[in-house]
Image (cartoon, helix red, strand yellow):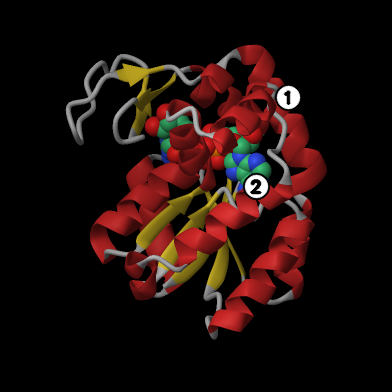
Amino acid sequence: MNLVLLGAPGAGKGTQAQKLVADYGVAHISTGDLLRAAVKAQSELGKQAKAYMDEGKLVPDQLVIDLVKERLQADDAKKGFILDGFPRNTAQAVTLDAELESMGIKLDGALLVDVAFPVIIERLSSRRTCRSCGYTAPAGTETCPRCGGEMYQRDDDKPETIAKRLDTYKAQTAPLIEYYGGKGILIKVDGDRPVEDVYVDVKKELGL
Ligand code: AP5
């Protein structure tokens, strides 16, 4: 399974990816998680990325593309991968196509988790994320159910940044729906239902 996940911030991409990874053992390549790890480590990349993330803007393409290229070469990605949060604009999608072609890998699909913006704002405002492993859950969850780590609110899950992230999504990422539709590999699921119901549809659409 080599998959791209599409959808607005908070649509549930990470949630569905976590389930696919647990059930099918593919690599979860989340550019958001990779960037947050770089920020936490205060690496040069993290220092450059932080200002963009705090503003709800996209981090410059080349920084993210280099991260993804490296991650695609890792051993665990040989069994298959889920790209979560990448590509985020047409330039990234074109680069990904070229990179996969050079590696002799075909994308099986681009899965769009479709959720209306008002639902998304509600979800992101109440999201908590594990500081250690990145697991996400609604507010009220104080200890990570997966690793026991501390749950916190991401800086970019504050209302003013959520609005900016949605603007960025509309302007730069939503056009990818047409991009992958044109390639005949777009798959769409209604993400505004309970997590397990969405997952049943995801598996059905992927033929799993
Ligand atoms: P990133 O971390 O990728 O954030 P995002 O796309 O904004 O996605 P989220 O993680 O916010 O949402 P999600 O769809 O995974 O939702 P989740 O499953 O957690 O990016 C952060 C920043 O990094 C960007 O703004 C940018 O600056 C930078 N960046 C990242 N990638 C980049 C790239 N390629 N290029 C440039 N810059 C990049 O669910 C949300 C909440 O809803 C959770 O609490 C969850 O429990 C709940 N939930 C999920 N599903 C359901 C459901 N069905 N019903 C009810 N609740 C649900």
Q: Amino acid at mark 2?
A: Leu
* Viewport quadrant of the C terminus: bottom left
Q: How many marks?
A: 2
Question: SS class of the residue under badge 2?
Answer: helix
> Which residue lies under the disc numbered 1?
164
Residue at 72% x, 49% y: name it: 61
Which residue sits at x=36%, y=60%? Answer: 27
Q: Secondary structure at mark 1?
A: helix
Looking at mark 2, is its residue's CB closer than 8 Å to ligand 1?
yes
- Identify the image quadrant of residue 178: bottom right
Of the two numbered discs 2 and 1 on the same chain, state the one appearing first in sequence. Answer: 2
Residue 40 percent location from the top left of the image: 44, 27
Residue denoted by label 2 = 63
Q: Residues within 10 Å of mark 2 (few under 14, many from 20)?
A: some
Q: Quadrant of residue 80?
A: bottom left
Amino acid at the residue labelled 1: Lys
On screen, residue 116 versus residue 38, left or right, reads: right
